[in-house]
Image (tube, rainbow, N blue to C red):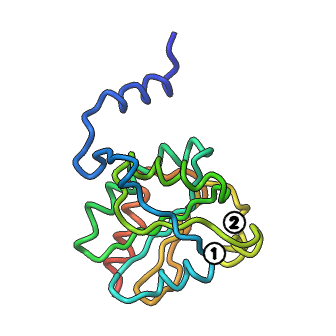
Amino acid sequence: MQSLRTAAIAAVIALPTPVWATPTTPSSAPALRPATAADILKAVRAPGARAVLVNVWATWCIPCREELPDLLRLRHDYAARGLRVILVSGDFSSDAEQAAGFLGQLGVDFPTYLKQGTDMEFIDAFDRKWSGALPATFIYDAAGHQKGVIHGIATYAQLEEHVRDVLNSK
């Protein structure tokens, strides 16, 4: 007998691929830019966004891989309202090509990052209460102030609620 989780995954696989997640060829996979926590936070504070969502993920993290399509759909749905999504791979440098290929298969066509530096420096720069478990999502306002944190996998509705709160705040 098939478990509910297996049935749900099979149902998702059977769905048509949305336009925003059309797979790309490996040659069009995004380059992962090596970045420290300070580099990522600088990108968070860069002008032009009303809300910024930073997601730290890894190819070996199954919940991360399950969550990424929802993050990309959220980006598609809210980019015009001022949402910037920043993806940060927690993979090892030796796995950067695999991570970029996975993002390419999802249709990611925007700059993405590969975590550099020590784990504790990276973790503490984002949230001292964060254990470092993946996935982890951090939501910021236009000024770069952290407005929300989600430790673990999040649904589209949870992500959307956090983003709407920031976009609707003055």
- Tell me which corner region of the image, top left, top right, bottom left or bottom right, holds residue 150: bottom right
Q: Which residue is drawn at 27% across and 61% down?
A: 76
Mark carried by residue 130: 2
Residue 64, relative to residue 127: is it above or below?
A: above
Q: Which residue is drawn at 62% across and 44% down?
A: 60
Quadrant where the C terminus is found in the figure: bottom left
Residue 143, relative to residue 157: is it above or below?
A: below
Q: Residue at x 38, y 52 (%)?
A: 27
Residue furthest to the top? 1
Residue 18 at x, y = what percent? Answer: 25, 44
Residue denoted by label 1: 126
Residue type at mark 1: give it: Phe
- Tell me which corner region of the image, top left, top right, bottom left or bottom right, holds residue 15: top left
Q: Marks 1 and 2: in contact by CB < 8 Å? A: yes
**Residues packed near mark 2 inside 10 Å, few (<14), some (14 to 19) or many (20 plus):** some
Mark carried by residue 64: none
Residue 136 at x, y = what percent? Answer: 58, 60
Residue 13 at x, y = what percent? Answer: 36, 30
Q: Which of 29 and 131 is in front in this view?
A: 29
Horizontal relation, residue 57 to residue 142: left or right = right
Residue 80, relative to residue 132: is it above or below?
A: below
